[in-house]
Image (spheres, rainbow, N blue to C red):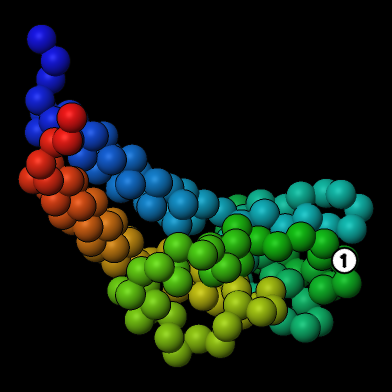
């Protein structure tokens, strides 16, 4: 006996709900706990990026502030990567959070946006819920369409 189109659609929707929600949360919040700064020597410093200016980068490592000349820093931090994440452009509630910030064209601007987004877990979940609702509506619409054989 073959499953009905409605049963198949319900299974797909359930599968999509889980993956969409997990993907959004992991994409935006998965790296929210530490920043990694790579120095020109290849050394990686892991901690909380406290300041990123034109002349220096300050990282809190195990409760101690460590300052590096900007010229010694080679890589972007995790917070800056979050600030540049394209998912932000697809979610109105997250766009609203960062609307007062400049575009993430520089490392510092991306970092500031990223740090702000790290504290917006309710907005991230809200956006995930909206995307799941959209998927539900599309699946329901597809299940109501007459089956053609």
Nearest the eye: 114 or 134: 134
Residue 109: image location, x then y, percent: 61, 80
User: Badge 1: how crowded within 10 Å, few (<14), some, or many (20+)?
Assistant: some
Residue reaching furthest to the right: 41
Please determine whether, in this image, residue 16 is positioned above or below residue 119: above
Q: Residue at x 60, y 77 (%)?
A: 104
Nearest the eye: 64 or 126: 126
Residue reaching furthest to the front: 149
Please determine whether, in this image, residue 5 is positioned above or below residue 122: above
Nearest the eye: 70 or 26: 26
Q: Is residue 36 left or right of residue 70?
A: left
Q: Residue at x 91, y 53 (%)?
A: 41
Q: How many marks?
A: 1
Query: Residue 105's image quarter?
Result: bottom right
Q: Secondary structure at mark 1?
A: helix
Residue reaching furthest to the top: 1
Q: Is residue 68 left or right of residue 106?
A: right
Decide if residue 107 is in sight here: yes
Residue 29: image location, x then y, percent: 43, 54
Please determine whether, in this image, residue 7 is positioned above or below residue 118: above
Residue 146: image location, x then y, percent: 10, 41
Q: Residue at x 36, y 69 (%)?
A: 91
Q: Which residue is mark 1?
A: 72
Q: Quadrant of the C terminus?
A: top left
Query: Residue 38's image quarter?
Result: bottom right
Q: Quadrant of the N terminus?
A: top left
Q: Is residue 144 left or right of residue 60?
A: left
Q: Residue at x 82, y 62 (%)?
A: 74
Q: Is residue 113 left or right of residue 93?
A: right
Decide if residue 61 is in sight here: no
Residue 118: image location, x then y, percent: 43, 64
């Amino acid at each position: 006996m073959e499953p009905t189109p409605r049963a198949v659609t319900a299974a797909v929707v359930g599968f999509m709900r889980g993956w969409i929600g997990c993907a959004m949360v992991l994409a935006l919040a998965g790296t929210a706990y530490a920043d990694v700064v790579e120095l020109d020597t290849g050394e990686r410093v892991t901690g909380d990026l406290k300041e990123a200016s034109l002349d220096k980068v300050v990282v809190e490592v195990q409760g101690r502030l460590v300052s590096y000349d900007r010229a010694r820093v080679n890589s972007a931090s995790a917070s800056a990567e979050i600030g540049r994440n394209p998912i932000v452009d697809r979610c109105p509630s997250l766009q609203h959070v960062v609307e007062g910030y400049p575009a993430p064209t520089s490392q510092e601007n991306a970092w500031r946006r990223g740090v702000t987004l790290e504290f917006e877990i309710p907005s991230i979940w809200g956006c995930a819920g909206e995307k799941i609702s959209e998927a539900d509506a599309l699946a329901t619409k597809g299940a109501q369409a007459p089956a053609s054989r």
